[in-house]
Image: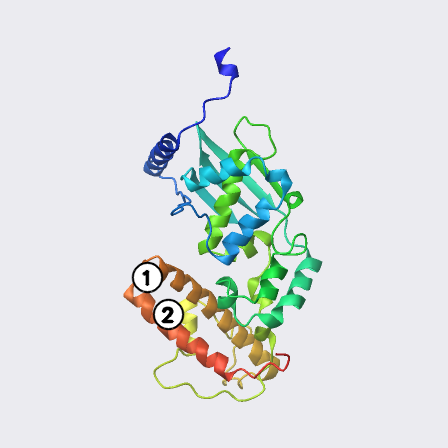
Amino acid sequence: MWNDYPPARLSVGTLQAYAHSEIKRRRKAGEDLEPVVIEGRTIARSFWGQAWCTNLERYVDYANRLPRGRSYARNGAIIDLKIQQGGASALVQGNSTYAVTVSIKGLGAPVWAALRRDCARDIDSLVELLQGRLSTHVMERVSRPQTGLFPSPAEITMTCSCPDIARMCKHKAATLYGVGARLDHRPELLFLLRGVDPAQLVLRAEAPLARAPRPPARGRLLAEEDLGALFGLDLDAAQPPQEAPPPPPTGRGRSTIEARARDAVASRLYALRAAAERGAATAEDRRTMAALEAWLANKRAQAPADPST
């Protein structure tokens, strides 16, 4: 019978037309789609995106299907990709629209503890970490097979609604490359996938303050109460209400509060900078970004020198 044979391979133009039509149809029906859009032929340009793709290509289990998946990802076949803790779901266009699910095992506690021990003293800030501005030592360490951040095939379970019974069909491969493309813009999603907190790699957030801070320049920096308004972050939530104002925290208590503020500011800054790079930042976003950068720079200047460096 003629339908015993697999369908003919789609041309790039046909694949793109199918994908465009399916996105339009589903959005008209009210579906919230997050397509993977890749400009040019390079799937990933940042450290995190490139390292994810390099990790995939390291494993012989995936080798024979990765080229087709790479082509599908480049040509807009991933009409939806959503990443959440421990996995991802995608819709990939082919002759039909296929549903792909990816489950990724969380990073083991011993592996995460070893990474924190080996890398923390070489990472100065959460912003630098997420932007991939890392030392060669840290880049090598987090990319190391089996004991780094990136999963091995044994830690990845995938399903696809297509009729291909192979462990790695082109739709699954496209989805994995789509994750790499998404990490280019949102590297924090890698830590979400592995179930760990990137802020824990920043050792300086745990270092106690050794001297009194300098007063900020008037009118140039955000006060802690302004941070609460920006992020919905209550820096003093752990303290019970009292009639008289409590004394300012000192030592490790103060360090913990300021660490939470720095992490919130760093995360918000990264999102604003990503929006600015895409041309999506408003004038208000740029003013907020300038204020946060000034606040963070002042906090870094106040921090004591790390005797281990």
Q: Looking at the image, do the residues carrying marks 2 and 1 touch, with CB atoms under 8 Å apart? A: yes
Above-or-below relation of 109 to 80? below
Q: x%, y% of residue 118?
A: 66, 67
Looking at the rendered structure, the kind of residue marked 2 is Met
Q: x%, y% of residue 227?
A: 42, 73
Q: Residue at x 56, y 56 (%)?
A: 191
Question: Between residues 288 and 138, which one lies in front from this camera angle?
Answer: 138
Which quadrant of the structure image shows residue 207? bottom right
State which quarter of the image contains the C terminus.
Answer: bottom right
The total of numbered circles placed on residues is 2
Decide which of tag 2 and tag 1 comes sooner along the chain. Answer: 1
Residue extending farthest left = 283
Residue extending farthest right = 110
Is residue 67 something that shows in the picture?
Answer: yes
Looking at the rendered structure, the kind of residue marked 1 is Ala
| Residue 289 numbered tag | 2
Is the residue marked by circle 1 packed among few (<14), some (14-19), or many (20+) residues within 10 Å?
Answer: some
Which quadrant of the structure image shows residue 75? top left
| Residue 30 numbered tag | none
Above-or-below relation of 120 to 302? above
Decide if residue 128 is on the left or right side of residue 307: left
Q: x%, y% of residue 19?
A: 38, 35
Above-or-below relation of 86 to 188? above
Name the secondary structure under disc 2. Answer: helix
| Residue 281 numbered tag | 1
